[in-house]
Amino acid sequence: MRAALAVAAALAAACLSTRAPAQKAYGPGVSDTEIKIGNTMPYSGPASPLSITGRVISAYFDEINEKGGVGGRKLNLISLDDAFSPPKTMEAARRLVEGDGVAFIFATMGTAPSSAIAKYLNSNKVPQIFLISSASKWNDPANMPWSIALPWAPNYTSEAAIDVAYARAKNPNARFAVLYQNDDAGKEYLRGVKEALGADADKAIAMASSFEVADPTVDSQVLTLANTKADVFMIYSVTPRACAQAIRKAHEVGWQPTRFLASGCANKATVMAPAGLEAGKGVLSLGALKPFVEAPKDDPAMTAYIDFMKKRLPNADINNVAGLYGYTVAEALVVLLKQCKDNLTRENIMAQAANLKSVPLSLLMPGITLNTTPQDFRPIKDGYMLQFDGNDWVVASELLRGT
């Protein structure tokens, strides 16, 4: 605890230091000309469809660099493949920190890979900035003061609670079937469902079934869940393949519950199209990002994103919303680095990440901004319910507040 308090004091001091007359202060990986940024991404393996996030981040930084960088410093992204394998993530992180000398690790994909390197990074006081996970474990500044996430939506516990409340508002006596990935993230989502149901959990949950990321299919689990004839089917996974299979198999066997899809899977290109657009019609998912629209009307931000993708990544599937998220998290990092000004020590980078005040990002939905404090590392707490209409994701609710 003393160590955590010492880190908190250092971060607070760093915040105060930004108010003093501007003086350049650099940590590892930073110079007058560049900021060296480390990243891991599943460019191979079962989660490889998510790797477009890394390619979009790199392209976004290229555009920033062509405009002069941040404070005159170019953003030098070193992105390594970890195949969504925690041991490979650990190996890559050590190489990035100890070999490449990066200033910080940014936007590692997934709860398990990010968890694998959190202790190492925190022990060495290396910021783990805007890692990609909605697990509530990342809101732990006392024990992990160097790790902060930027998820697609509120954390898994809040997402599950909002999903349950939305379902019960339509059917107070609904029975729930839950398919979840057998890892910390999936177990947290299931726990969130149980907590939201409270004393009714044992009666209301018809069945919960898990699967492994490496499983070739989830068909047998879905068939077992379908036999319960539950009113609500909740699907949690970070791998698009499992999400698509779950939607398709439920449709094939004629099971027609209200379906909730984890926010990270609300992706037309990698989930709904493989599942079958008709099979996915009506599926619900919580989100904080604007749903992708190929022909936006009166939305300059979405138009700018589409123009960016056509120019920078012309061969990428523009319908893959993992790209839209990459654009958003890259935009968030640029805002953060500008907030650091010329104090680019690791301490101040982390301190500024913990002091975001109503930060707007171009592709966040109305009413949603980034907000953090040294005591609360959750940048996003609220979202909207989205529904797949057979062709696109559309907004289906007012702003839903998380806790």
Image: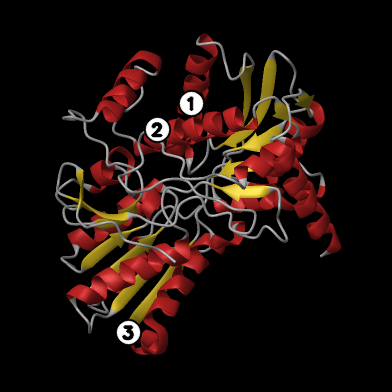
Which of 178 and 342 lies nearest the eye of the viewer?
A: 342
Looking at the image, residue 141 sits to the left or right of residue 211; the answer is right
Classify the position of the N terminus by image quarter.
bottom right
Mark 2 secondary-structure assignment: helix
Which of 277 and 339 lies nearest the eye of the viewer?
A: 339
Q: Is residue 393 visible?
A: yes
Q: Residue 36: x, y in percent?
A: 69, 24
Q: Residue 101: x, y in percent?
A: 78, 27
Q: Are marks 3 and 2 in contact (CB under 8 Å)?
A: no
Circle 2: is it few (<14), some (14-19), or many (20+) Cα within 10 Å?
many
What number of labels is visible?
3
In the rendered view, tell whether residue 359 sits above or below residue 75.
Answer: below
The amino acid pointed to by label 3 is Ala
Looking at the image, residue 193 sits to the left or right of residue 89; the answer is left
Quote the CA–CA distance across marks 3 and 2. Answer: 37 Å
Quote the CA–CA distance across marks 1 and 2. Answer: 8 Å
Q: Residue 361: x, y in percent?
A: 41, 36
Q: Are marks 1 and 2 in contact (CB under 8 Å)?
A: yes
In the rendered view, tell whether residue 400 sits above or below residue 131.
Answer: below
Q: Quadrant of residue 175?
A: bottom left
Quote the CA–CA distance across marks 3 and 1. Answer: 42 Å
Mark 3 secondary-structure assignment: helix
Q: Which residue is mark 1?
A: 55
Looking at the image, residue 378 sits to the left or right of residue 120; the answer is left
Q: Which residue is mark 3?
A: 204
Classify the position of the C terminus by image quarter.
bottom left
Q: Which residue is mark 2?
A: 323
Q: Is residue 222 visible?
A: no
